[in-house]
Amino acid sequence: DADGNRVEQFEPGLIAYARGGKDIRFNQPAATGGYGEYKRASLHTISAGFRVPYELLTGDLSQVNYSSIRAGLVEFRRMIDAVQWQLFIPMLCAPVWRWFTEAAWAAGQIPTPDVPVEWSPPKFEAVDPQKDALANLLSIRSGTMTLAEVIAKQGRNPDAVLAEIAATNAKLDALGLVLDSDPRRVTKTGSAQTSDPAADPAADPAGSPSTAQE
């Protein structure tokens, strides 16, 4: 300072008088590039350690497209599916269910402690619902999957869903309503279903019924 004493710290409100010919300079570090890449690489390492896609861990979707995010989610969901069926259901859900049924049997609420149970984990939200729905439709029509399997994949009870569909169809029939979503009455293209294929000229490869009679 002006008296020759070394100023070792600065405090709020300090007024320092420098000696003649002296000034005060502060360090001004220059900004260095590549910090964003460093953070991104660090988060990639963390996501790999947790076996979670980087995009799900950070919410950063700036460097992905539809194909890459779908491929990453497929692998992640396969791992989650294995964890559900090999860890959570046999090691947590099944023992809890067994304890519950045994307690209900001991209390006289049910006749036997062995009660069958079917596990249905929550469904995964589709990245492209239309493509997934078409894939399920083709699987059912080709016989590689059953309707009950597809419904179970949605996290719902197949019996309850089919009963609900039957009740809805009965109510529509009672009211005389025909919806475009009813496959019993309307085709996928929106035209009316025909009960007799011979009544539909387009379904007769030999031509119309009148032509066949002639």
Image (cartoon, helix red, strand yellow):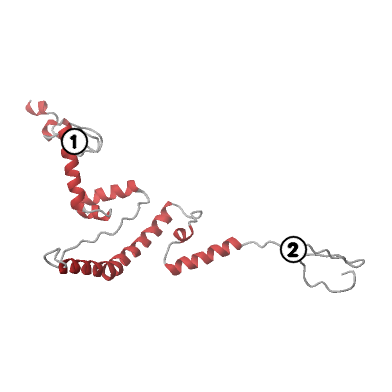
Question: Is the residue under label 2 in contact with that under label 1 (CB below 8 Å)?
Answer: no
CA separation in Å, label 1 and label 2:
77 Å
User: Where residue 79 appears, x then y in whole percent?
Assistant: 35, 65
**145 lies left or right of 36:** left
User: Where residue 8 appears, x then y in whole percent?
Assistant: 79, 73
What residue sits right under mark 1 in the picture? 172
| Amino acid at pointer 1 | Leu
Residue displayed at 84% across by 74% down: 6
Residue density around tag 2, few if under 14, some if 14–19, many if 20 or more, within 10 Å: few
Residue displayed at 25% across by 48% down: 137
User: Where residue 143 appears, x then y in whole percent?
Assistant: 19, 53
Depth check, front residue: 1 or 194: 1
Residue displayed at 86% across by 74% down: 5
Depth check, front residue: 203 or 5: 5
**125 lies left or right of 210:** right
Q: Quadrant of residue 172?
A: top left
What secondary structure is marked by label 2?
Answer: loop
The answer to whether residue 146 is visible is: no
Q: Quadrant of residue 68?
A: bottom left
What residue sits right under mark 2 in the picture? 28
